[in-house]
Amino acid sequence: MSQTITLYVDGACRGNGKDIAVGGWGAYISCGSEEYKIYGGELQTTNNRMELSAAIEGVRYCPQDAKLIIWTDSNYVKQGITEWIHGWKKKNWKDVKNPDLWKELDAVCQGRDIEWNWIKGHAGHEGNEMADHLANLGADLALEKGEKARQVPPSPFDLTSRGNNDKKKPQSDWLLDDPFGFDLMEAEPVDEEVILETAEEVQMSTSVSDTEQTTTLSNPIDSDESKKTHPDIVITPATKKLHGPRQLILDTETTGFYYQDGDRIIEVGAIEMINRKLTGSSIHIYINPKKSVGESENVHGISDDFLKDKPLYEDIANTLFDYLKGAEIIAHNASFDMNFLDMEFTRAGFPALSEVCAVTDTLAMAKSKHPGQKNSLDALVRRYEIPQRDRTFHGALLDAEILADVYLAMTGGQVSFDIDALSHTEEENASSGPAKVEIDLPVIHASEEELEKHEKWVKQFEEKHGMPCLFAK
């Protein structure tokens, strides 16, 4: 009977995402009464790369035929290897961060019996705390040597059955090779990604009553008050007082696609809609991300110089949270925006926005209505003949306005069921009854050859069945 080995793996990074970043990985391995500690680190890395390295080295250290019970405090690793990796493979690793390490982890796991588990980090668990300690030792070792460093004693296990998967191959440096995939809207959301480990430390409880989501709302925050907080928080008051559930068409702009690796929100725009009518209320905020926008400037046109005097997220979090909470958030590729907003709010000490808001993803709606077709916002604008706007650059508020038109067009078949939502013109059209539709269908006549074949087939049918053919002239 094969042995069972328990592993606690963890990664650490000081200065994550910066040029001076130094990271370490550690694996605490327990087999019966025996325990083993391995660790290593490198410069110019990220926390997620170290989390992956800890898992790779920990698995590699163990024999192929052992049952492995692995505990990690990184949902990025746990969900990646158990759920997301299947979709990544189908798409040939398109738009995947750290593909070299994911491929390596997948290789060392092949043919093994592994049980993956998540454990809350920094919660006092002995195994996880030891792995964290080892990861920091690995970072110290890398800093001391100024290069990639490992402290891995020879494995005491019987490794005769480990196979070729454990031969470590040199890998190219993918850390800096992560160009922005500007067609992200066409990719499946990786979706179901996790909140940063720092966010996991925030423990707050909140409750939103059902009535809070269906209250009479025009503008929940006084715009003059918000402007006193910072001039870059712009809240437009509602011009229409409507009753019913509150929807917010929302979009964000960010420094990149990967909130797990330190990308931040730089712009938020949302417009309010009640009963399928825009109230006139909106919120728009620019935010200083405390990091360079990099190549993402090519998408949104927002520069580092423009953002340098803008407020930090923690400065605007209270105002933004009050405006958004309790509403139904409507966004295109909503998991992208919600993951970033959840991360930013929890970092600022608030509950995750997804806990206090319903969410509707118009990308998922579009894929359901138009399978196999392009469903980016631009594609939907063309398909539904939405009036064109200047989109030289993406902007959060502009995209929210366009998305509002697209959402109403996609769900337009239900307008007639809501009398209150009908405009005056729509009411007139509805009262006039269904319109008569006249279509000139083309008539295609059969050729002489086709008529002869038809006559021959009819005769054969009548001879065989002894009855006239239904298709005879």
Image: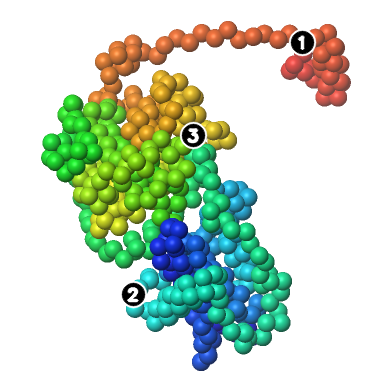
Mark 1 or 2, which is nearer the eye?
2
Image spot of residue 446 (x, y percent): 77, 10
Image spot of residue 382 (x, y percent): 48, 24
Q: Is 24 or 473 nearer to us in this picture?
A: 24
Secondary structure of the residue carrying tag 3 is: loop
Q: Is 79 or 24 nearer to us in this picture?
A: 24
Locate the C terminus by quadrant.
top right
Res 326 quadrant in image:
top left
Res. 379 mark: none
**Residue at point 66%, 72% (across, down):** 166
What residue did someone put label 3 on? 376
Q: What's the coloring here?
A: rainbow
**Residue at point 57%, 61% (across, down):** 102
Q: Is residue 187 left or right of residue 210?
A: right
Res. 123 mark: 2
* C-alpha distance separating marks 3 and 1: 43 Å
* C-alpha distance separating marks 3 and 2: 42 Å
Q: Is residue 415 above or below residue 253?
A: above
Q: Is residue 460 left or right of residue 151?
A: right
**Residue at point 54%, 69% (across, down):** 147
The amino acid type, in three-letter code, at marker 1 is Ala
Secondary structure of the residue carrying tag 1 is: loop
Mark 3 or 1, which is nearer the eye?
3
The amino acid type, in three-letter code, at marker 2 is Ala
What residue did someone put label 1 on? 446
**Residue at point 35%, 36% (across, down):** 396
Image spot of residue 435 (x, y percent): 42, 11
Badge 3 crowding class, 10 Å Cα cut-off, few under 14, some 14 to 19, many 20 or more, is: some
